[in-house]
Each structure stands twice: as C-alpha cells, then as structure tokens.
Amino acid sequence: AWAAALAYSVQLYFDFSGYSDMAIGLGLMFGLKLPDNFNSPYKSAGIIDFWRRWHMSLGLWVRDYIYIPLGGSREGDIKRTRNVILSMLFTGLWHGLGWTFILWGMLHGVMLAVNHQWRRLGLRLPAVIAWGITFGCVVLCWVIFRATSISEGINILSSMFNAKSIFSRHNLFIMRDAAYIVLALVMTLLCPNT
C-alpha cells in the first residue's frame, strides 16, 4: 500500500509537471505566454505553500471566484475556516462528482485551516519535519483521491498502518521497491527545475 501510494504520488507529480511544461511550451510556439501552473509542490513545508505551488491556475480561480466572494478572511477566523473548507470542497468537486473527491477536498480544507491557525499562533517546526508532515499528509490524501470508494480508501490507509502486514516477509520485497520510488522522489526534489 505504501509503495502504491508513493508511486501514485510520483506519477501525479510527473504527469502534472509534464503537462504544465507542455502547455507553456505550446503556448510559446503560438506566441502566448502562459503563467506557471506548477512549481515543485513536493518541496513545500506546509499545505498552504503546497497549494500555492500545485495547480496554481485552479488555486487562483478558486480564490478569486469562490473564496473571496464567500468573504475570504475578512470576517474573522471562524468564517475564514468555513470559506477555506468550502473552497476546497469545490476543488474536490471540480476533480469529479464522487464522495472520494469531496472527502479529499474536505481533508485539504481542514489541513489548510489548521495550517492557517498554526501560522496565526506563530508556531514553527524545523523545516525537514514540516516538509515530512506536509508530504505525508498529501500522500495519504492521494490515497483517498485515487480510491474508487471511501471504503476502499480506508482499507488501503488501514493496511498502510498495520504493522503486522508492513513487516510480513512478502512486503519486505515491496519495501525494497518503495525505497526505489523514494529515491526517485528525493532526486526529483533535489533537481531545481522540476
């Protein structure tokens, strides 16, 4: 389950990065300067930063046409939290009309609200820990995003945290393959232009 979740995270990263680069390149071929839409989001040390780097055009659209019309952050913390969660619920629905997408959007909305409160309180974590938490949360949410149903997503997540199954003899070979995936991801993070 961990190997699959990490592999899917890497697949999405390269898919979206490649599509964004192709769109920008094709635009330049026709004399159009398209804005960046992807900026190394897996380097983020917070979910707020992740969403400033991942699918930037969708994020700006949701901010301008959903979040700000709802009141944005002008009406206090409680309404800002509501607005963030509703905006991310819309983002989930934008990806598809399914409960998994709604749950994925809600989870990201809650994580954004927590990250905003964390910043408001002036709390800080060491960068590597903040990155690990952010990346871990994003990977876990990708499981829900990819699952065909919420129950399937929960089953996969529960197998990811079942110590007995993680250390079974069969899974030791899978863990080796997961190490290759992590190595590819680390190399990706170290490359400045991906």
Image (spheres, rainbow, N blue to C red):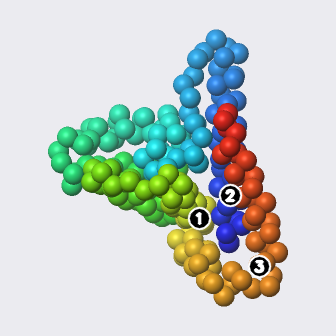
Q: Secondary structure at mark 2?
A: helix
The answer to which of marks 2 and 3 sits earlier in the sequence is: 2
User: In this view, which residue lies farthest toward the bottom?
Assistant: 164
User: Is residue 84 depicted above or below 24 in this figure?
Assistant: below
Where residue 35 appears, x then y in whole percent?
Answer: 54, 25
Circle 3 packing at 10 Å, graded few (<14), some (14-19), many (20+), is some
Q: What number is the disc on residue 171? A: 3
Q: Secondary structure at mark 1?
A: helix
Residue 4 sits in which quadrant? bottom right
Q: What number is the disc on residue 143? A: 1
Circle 2 packing at 10 Å, graded few (<14), some (14-19), many (20+), is some
Q: CA distance from mark 2 to mark 1?
A: 8 Å
From the viewer's side, name the closer residue of 76 and 86. 76
Q: Amino acid at mark 1?
A: Val
Residue at the spot 42% in from the left edge and 35% down from the top edge: 61
Residue at the spot 50% in from the left edge and 36% down from the top edge: 56
The answer to which of marks 2 and 1 sits earlier in the sequence is: 2
Q: CA distance from mark 2 to mark 3?
A: 18 Å
Residue at the spot 43% in from the left edge and 35% down from the top edge: 60
Residue at the spot 75% in from the left edge and 52% down from the top edge: 184
User: Is residue 103 depicted above or below 41 in this figure?
Assistant: below
Where residue 82 appears, x then y in whole percent?
Answer: 27, 54
From the viewer's side, name the closer residue of 116 and 142. 116
State which quarter of the image contains the N terminus: bottom right
Residue 118 visible to an observer of this rendering: yes
Q: Amino acid at mark 2?
A: Tyr
From the viewer's side, name the closer residue of 122 and 62. 122
Badge 2 vs badge 1, beta-carbon distance below 8 Å = yes
Q: Secondary structure at mark 3?
A: helix
Residue at the spot of label 2? 8
Q: Is residue 81 left or right of residue 108?
A: left
